[in-house]
Amino acid sequence: MANTSASTSAAANHPPGGRGVDVLVASTVPDASIPRDQTSRESTSAAVVVAAPGGDVVLVVGKRRARIQVFSVVLRNSSRVFEAMLRPEFAEGAKLFLNTHGSAPVDIELPEDDPDAMGKLCKMLHCTADAGASPGGAQSLLDLARAADKYDLVSRVVFPATQWLTELMKRPAVRDAELLLGLMAAYTLKHATGFANLSRALMMQHAGSWCDLLKGLPDVDGLAHELLVALEEARSYIHACVCETVNNLAMMSAINSCLCTLEKPDIVNRWFLGLGGSQFLTINLTTLQTLSIVHLSRDVYHLSHLGSDHLSGLRHVCGRNPRPLLTEVVYGIVAKKLASFKGLCLRCFDRKNRYVGATGGCRLAH
């Protein structure tokens, strides 16, 4: 009798033209709204996110097999990717079509996606109460951006991402690695303002080798390397401008300061080398490329205020010292150069619209 009842129930839920086996498989899928002690062992160990109570689809995401209950109509109306996936000619859409009259939601496997990112994304699509909350750290933000890009949902994320990227950049004692992850998220979301601000913050804050920064980040892709190359181009450009400025002003201070036959470039060279071992190590040419621009500009400020007593070790043959650098001149030029750099331009950096021609941080005239 039990077998007869089960067969009768299956036949009642069987859609026209369907197969009984498909209906039985679909009808035995545990509902995400059922208490966890009534579900199978597999679903008991997995997280359950109810983005839409009563939804007709459960996304089974990642290796953790997290279960996210959603409405298929919301997914299809929001994303061209989901709209294509849920068509009857595809396996996922066929399962949904055959379960039209079923009471349990249909499971759709997404094994390659991040459960937390997909859960956050589905909540945003269904406008839940906590949809606008920050996804968490920089890595979570990047995972969310990648999921949005994969499913053509960037337009749904880019507006709240403005607040999330700003919070990340202004976070106290934010690490360089977090800034890089946020920069990658801004590029993925095509967020021009966040991309410029985060790239400037990272270039101004990071000191040392970019390789050391990458070592602390697992699973970085080619995008991270391209970003760091672009940042190093901008950093080297400003470093070179600072060196040229200091060098030119040092030459000016040496002109007509004495009557000895010592060549002026040699005077400048000795002037720089005399700084080695002093408290102004960041302006030393041997360490310039491995130091932070913030520290560099700070030491240039102190260097521009040096008096003759600080240059006593650079006496010429005639016994006279070169005049000190003009007060505020060097620092003013460096500050102006730093202020002119507004960060990397998203349009210029975009790999699909790459154009090399202009000098400085931006390769296109805007």
Image: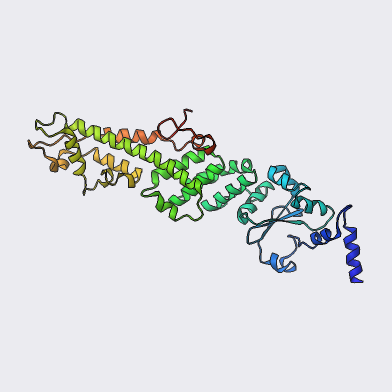
* 117 left or right of 172 in image: right
* 193 left or right of 311 in image: right
Horizontal and vertical percent position of residue 12: 90, 59
Asked if residue 360 can be seen in this view, the reply is: yes
Horizontal and vertical percent position of residue 267: 16, 36
Q: Furthest-left residue in view?
A: 318
Q: Quadrant of residue 275?
A: top left
* 142 left or right of 21 in image: left
Quadrant location of the N terminus in the rendered image: bottom right
Task: Say which residue appears at 51% left-offset and 50% top-offset.
Answer: 221
Which residue is nearer to you in this view: 93 or 115? Answer: 93
Image height of 269 relative to 206, above or below? above
Image height of 111 relative to 147, above or below? below
Task: Say which residue appears at 75% left-offset and 68% top-offset.
Answer: 38
* 140 left or right of 174 in image: right
Horizontal and vertical percent position of residue 339: 39, 35
